[in-house]
Image (cartoon, helix red, strand yellow):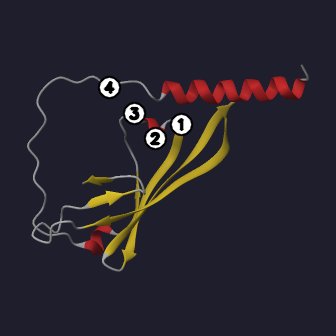
Amino acid sequence: MSSTVQFTLFGLTVVLCATLSNALFVIKFGKCPSVTAQATLDTAQYLGVWYEYQRFPAIFEAGLDCTTATYGEDGDKISVTNAGTTRIDLFGSKIVLNHNSVEGSATVPDPAKPAELSVSFGGGSFPV
């Protein structure tokens, strides 16, 4: 096997191990808090770029770094772009492998509850 193929396989193994190490379970005990939505939504404060500063492991974010959620005006909807970078730490340097993003939209399914949004990324919608 050539050294180029060996190096490529080594790199893929490192990325796979880094990805899997981020996909561990979090176990916590206790009841969930009772949460209610706000009565209104001030979109001027909501729109823009939001930076992730903490997360629970999720398979769709495995291996991502520098993740953001960007919300914008899109008529009667809110555009949603979730993005992140896949990077590895190699000998003390961060190497960018690729940039990932997914486009979606948020809508208000019940006008009586304008701060409760339903977010869709093509497949299904998720209440937030």
Q: Quadrant of residue 27?
A: top left
Q: CA distance from mark 2 to mark 3?
A: 9 Å
Determine crowd level at label 3: few under 14, some 14-19, many 20+ residues with C-alpha closer than 10 A: some
- Front position in the image: 77 or 47: 77
Q: Is residue 55 left or right of residue 98?
A: left
Whether the residues at callouts 3 and 4 have beta carbons within 8 Å, the answer is yes
Q: First in sequence, mark 1 or 3: give its number.
A: 3
User: Which residue is pictured at 30% across the width and 78% down the height?
Assistant: 76
Q: Is residue 94 left or right of residue 9?
A: left
Q: Label 3 is placed on what type of residue? A: Pro
* Placement of 95 over or under 80, stated as above or below: above
* Placement of 105 over or under 124, stated as above or below: below
Whether the residues at callouts 1 and 2 have beta carbons within 8 Å, the answer is no
Label number found at residue 26: 4
Residue at which label 2 appears = 60
x and y percent of residue 102 in the render?
A: 49, 55
How many circles with numbers are drawn on the protein? 4
Q: First in sequence, mark 4 or 2: give its number.
A: 4
x and y percent of residue 91 in the render?
A: 70, 29
x and y percent of residue 90 in the render?
A: 69, 31
Determine crowd level at label 4: few under 14, some 14-19, many 20+ residues with C-alpha closer than 10 A: few
Residue placed farthest to the top in the image?
1
- Front position in the image: 9 or 38: 9
Label number found at residue 57: 3
Q: First in sequence, mark 3 or 4: give its number.
A: 4
Q: CA distance from mark 3 to mark 4?
A: 7 Å
Residue placed farthest to the bottom in the image?
75
Labels 1, 2: front one: 2
- Secondary element under disc 1, as helix, strand or loop, is loop
Q: CA distance from mark 4 to mark 2?
A: 16 Å
